[in-house]
Image: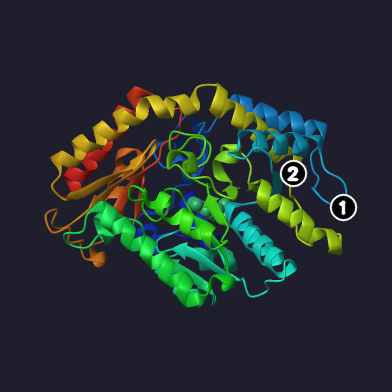
């Protein structure tokens, strides 16, 4: 038996992704063994309220019996399959029916992946395939926004608008990033919110004119940018941009990997922000984090056009070994039921005002918090050196990391993103747990500032 601590064992054999290595060096790795509701517990019995919902996904908490029962029952019944060669599981069919039913589309079709990155990647391939088949092989460029997060595969990382992808030589050519719709940060001095939106709409028109509409395959957007630091769009943003995209025949894809299934207070983020996309990308909440799974949900126009494009070659040559895995589908069916019919989505709607009020209170007590932004159960507090001028702290001070690390010491997990602290708790959060989150965050801010 290895006598080393769990932390040392983890560090010996793990290559860490998306992890601040100096923090690991000074603080060690937390090795978790189980969870209770919104809490996670480690090998030493230490306990944290996870206001990060794992990674936005554990919306029903970490020990939801209905979800584990659904998984066990399906493992007993039929543990594995894919969704091609003319065979798929009954659970896969039922989930696709459910997804079309709860989608904003009157009808549509579903394609399964193992993750959100793969779902975005799949959607790009579908668009490239479609445009080629329709005689527009040059329609390959993808429009996204700075600060967007769409995943880590070579294509979805190219769609992601984060400078850290430069270390991979990404983005690939042909991925064009428009201005991030964050009015507080991106608005010019003296510019009103509606003027800001008009500027972003004009930018889109200019980019389309410069590149040529006949070279653009599609536009991808998260309704609220999540990993960019919880950035709800400026008011009227989608209402201004979507008609321009439609005018130029550019499909609009809503990446609902975080926003889908209740996070913003509606089933879909696009519903919260009043636009209907041509397709939806789903993952994370789709299975309440109990199974790795992603889905492309195509609306009627794209599914009809894809059907017509596939017909002459008689096959769409794409799919993953575990596409439409029956255990994942059984869990997703249960998760959708739990979130939508057992009060979880309603809890987000009911408690979002309380969450906003509590965080606003915290912001008012700490002059180094410059902005509170969010919706539903996804919020961020942005730390600034000077709230008046919005001057950020120098990055080397790692202020948000220090806040998050102090929260961890106090028994609260929250995520540092840029200069912001993100709070996206599970949908099951009670008032008492929300108060615990406020108190611990408040104490952490007192200690850091
Ligand atoms: N799209 C969005 C909006 C996301 O937030 C994420 C992950 O955080 C992804 C796509 C990628 O999903 P995955 O990590 O499952 O590949």
In the rendered image, the residue lying farthest to the front is: 247
Marker count (numbered):
2
Residue 443 in the image: x percent, y percent? 21, 39
Q: Is residue 192 above or below residue 270?
A: below
Residue nearest the observer in this picture, 225 or 285 = 225
Can you tell which mark lies on residue 325?
Answer: 2
Image point 80% across, 59% down: which residue?
Answer: 310
Residue 215 lies left or right of residue 112; in this view the side is left
Q: Which residue is mark 1?
A: 85
Quadrant of residue 25 within the rendered picture:
bottom left
Using a 10 Å C-alpha cutoff, classify the residue at mark 2 as few (fewer than 14 neighbours), some (14 to 19) or many (20 or more). Answer: many
Image point 72% across, 66% down: which residue?
Answer: 134
Residue 360 in the image: x percent, y percent? 22, 37
Q: Is residue 133 above or below residue 435?
A: below
Give the SS element for disc 2: loop
For the residues labelled 2 and 1, say whether their Cβ atoms are less than 8 Å apart. no
Residue nearest the observer in this picture, 330 or 29 = 330
Q: Is residue 401 visible?
A: yes
Q: Is residue 433 above or below residue 250?
A: above
Q: Marks 2 and 1, Cα distance to the nearest angstrom?
A: 14 Å
Image point 55% across, 54% down: which residue?
Answer: 253
Q: Is residue 395 above or below residue 406?
A: below
Residue 139 in the image: x percent, y percent? 62, 71
Using a 10 Å C-alpha cutoff, classify the residue at mark 1 as few (fewer than 14 neighbours), some (14 to 19) or many (20 or more). Answer: few
Give the SS element for disc 1: loop
Q: Earlier in the sequence, mark 2 or mark 1?
A: 1
């Amino acid at each position: 038996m290895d006598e080393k601590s769990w932390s040392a064992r983890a560090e010996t054999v793990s290559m860490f992704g998306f992890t601040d290595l100096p923090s690991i060096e000074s603080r060690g790795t937390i090795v978790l063994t189980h969870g209770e509701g919104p809490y996670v517990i480690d090998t030493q019995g230490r306990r944290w309220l996870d206001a990060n919902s794992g990674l936005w996904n554990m919306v029903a908490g970490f020990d939801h019996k209905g979800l584990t029962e659904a998984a066990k029952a399906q493992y007993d019944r039929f543990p594995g399959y894919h969704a091609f060669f003319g065979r798929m599981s009954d659970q896969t069919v039922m989930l696709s029916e459910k997804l079309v039913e709860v989608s904003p589309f009157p009808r549509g079709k579903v394609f399964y992946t193992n993750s959100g990155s793969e779902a975005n990647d799949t959607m790009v391939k579908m668009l490239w395939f479609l445009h080629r088949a329709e005689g527009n092989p040059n329609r390959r460029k993808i429009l996204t926004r700075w600060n967007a997060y769409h995943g880590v595969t070579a294509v979805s990382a190219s769609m992601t608008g984060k400078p850290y992808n430069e270390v991979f030589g990404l983005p690939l050519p042909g991925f064009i990033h428009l201005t991030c719709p964050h009015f507080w940060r991106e608005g010019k001095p003296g510019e009103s919110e509606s003027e800001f939106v008009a500027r972003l709409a004009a930018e889109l028109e200019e980019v389309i004119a410069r590149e040529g509409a006949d070279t653009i395959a599609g536009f991808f957007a998260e309704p609220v940018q999540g990993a960019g630091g919880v950035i709800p769009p400026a008011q009227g943003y989608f209402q201004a941009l979507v008609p321009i995209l439609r005018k130029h025949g550019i499909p609009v894809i809503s990446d609902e990997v975080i926003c889908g299934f209740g996070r913003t207070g509606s089933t879909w983020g696009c519903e919260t922000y009043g636009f209907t996309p041509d397709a939806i990308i789903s993952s994370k909440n789709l299975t309440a984090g109990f199974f790795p799974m992603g889905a492309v949900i195509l609306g009627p126009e794209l599914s009809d056009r894809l059907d017509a494009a596939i017909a002459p070659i008689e096959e769409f040559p794409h799919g993953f070994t575990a596409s439409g895995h029956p255990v994942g589908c059984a869990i997703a069916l249960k998760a959708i039921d739990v979130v939508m019919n057992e009060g979880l989505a309603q809890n987000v709607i009911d408690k979002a005002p309380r969450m906003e009020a509590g965080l606003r209170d915290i912001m008012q007590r700490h002059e180094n918090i410059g902005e509170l932004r969010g919706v539903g159960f996804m919020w961020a507090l942005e730390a600034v050196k000077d709230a008046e001028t919005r001057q950020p702290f120098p990055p080397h001070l790692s202020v948000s990391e220090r806040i998050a690390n102090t929260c961890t010491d106090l028994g609260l997990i929250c995520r540092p993103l840029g200069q912001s602290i993100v709070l996206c708790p599970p949908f099951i959060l009670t008032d008492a747990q929300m108060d615990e989150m406020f108190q611990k965050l408040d104490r952490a801010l007192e200690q850091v500032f």
